[in-house]
Amino acid sequence: MLKIITVGVATFLVTAFPLAYAQAPSGAANVGTLTDMQISLVKAALQLTPDQEKYWPTIEEAIRAKAQDRETRVTAAAKRLAELRQNPIEVLQTPNPVEFLQNRADALAQRSADLKKLASAWQPLYATLTSDQKKRMASLTLFVLREMSSSMEQHDMQCDEQY
């Protein structure tokens, strides 16, 4: 029963992270706090054994690097959007689709590298997880992915309403 409650609470709180990232003011302190909470919740939901704990620092480092890189991308995008809003006529007169595609490719490459690093960090620990731990991890993953999808759809609708 305690495991079910732990997973339920962890799942609920992990679900809030995409929304919190989207709504929280930009800043390293906020990203750090949210990342700390996310790490704590995932670790608590997995209930690692002492032997499994030795794999955790690599995973935590990968999670933090991914969060920091995301914050950097969001900050750069916000800065670019602010510049575009200040000079919309100039942007329309001199569109540069090649630059846009290159910037997008760079952002996707960074996200890909972060995900590969995260997957590589998880691999050794995942091999040691019990079937119960794997089920909890799978449940968390599916729930978070579903909520991220919903959050992205909500963000797209908000963007459509603004324009």
Image (cartoon, grey):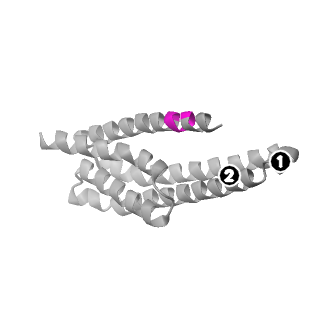
Residue 73 in percent (x, y) is at 60, 55
Task: Say above or below: 110 vs 134.
Answer: below
- Given residues 138 and 144, the one toward you in this image is 144
- Is 155 part of what is drawn in magenta? yes
Residue 78 in percent (x, y) is at 62, 54
Task: Say above or below: 59 vs 94.
Answer: below
- Amino acid type assigned to the residue bearing label 2 in the image: Leu
Residue at 20%, 45% (x, y): give it.
Answer: 6
Residue 92 in percent (x, y) is at 83, 44
Q: How far apart are the two marked residues, 1 and 2, measured between alpha carbons?
A: 14 Å
Magenta-drawn stretch, dominant element (helix, strand or loop)? helix
Q: Which mark is residue 81?
A: 2
- Given residues 51 and 26, the one toward you in this image is 26
Residue 1 in percent (x, y) is at 11, 39
- Amino acid type assigned to the residue bearing label 1 in the image: Ile
Residue at 83%, 47% (x, y): give it.
Answer: 89
Q: Which mark is residue 29?
A: none
Quadrant in which the C terminus appears: top right
Disc 1: which residue: 89
Which numbered disc, 1 or 2, marks the residue closer to the eye? 1
Task: Say above or below: 4 vs 69.
Answer: above
**Could you tell whether 25 is left or right of 104 in the image?**
left
Q: Which residues are magenta?
A: 153-157
- Given residues 101 and 116, the one toward you in this image is 101
